[in-house]
Image (cartoon, rainbow, N blue to C red):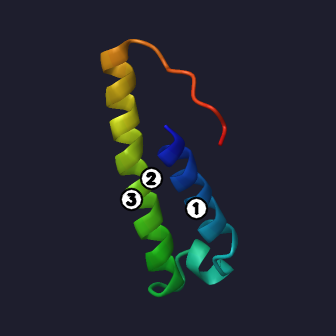
């Protein structure tokens, strides 16, 4: 769960510094690829977290740090 939070933060930070032409899709490559890789990693981890919650039947408490 902590890893998922870290991956969300990383993807968010990469998106915030992404130039507008990449955000709108008028340019591709470079910085956009780094952001896309971070998003794929974050979504893969989210699937693992969802599976864990499904098996446990509850969301475990996890400290912020």
Circle 2 residues within 10 Å: few <14, some 14–19, many ≥20? many
Give the vertical position of 19 relative to 63 (above or below).
below
Residue found at x 68% / y 75%: 17
Q: CA distance from mark 3 to mark 1?
A: 12 Å
- Frontmost residue, 16 versus 5: 5
Circle 2 residue: 42
Q: CA distance from mark 2 to mark 1?
A: 9 Å
Numbered badge on residue 10: 1
Residue found at x 51% / y 54%: 7
Circle 3 residue: 40
Query: Which quarter of the picture shows residue 63?
Result: top right
Circle 3 residues within 10 Å: few <14, some 14–19, many ≥20? few
Among the two numbered marks 2 and 1 on one chain, the one whose residue lies closer to the N terminus: 1
Q: CA distance from mark 3 to mark 2?
A: 5 Å
Is mark 3 in CB contact (under 8 Å) with mark 2? yes
Q: Position of residue 43 (x, y in %)?
A: 41, 49
Is mark 2 in CB contact (under 8 Å) with mark 1? yes
Quarter of the picture containing the C terminus is top right
Of circles 3 and 1, the one toward us is 1
Dot 2: element: helix
């Amino acid at each position: 769960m902590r890893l998922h939070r870290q991956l969300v933060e990383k993807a968010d930070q990469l998106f915030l510094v992404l130039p507008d032409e990449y955000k709108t899709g008028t340019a591709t490559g470079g910085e956009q690829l780094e952001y896309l890789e971070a998003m794929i990693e974050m979504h893969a981890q989210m699937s693992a977290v969802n599976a864990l919650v499904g098996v446990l039947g509850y969301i475990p408490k996890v400290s912020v740090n």
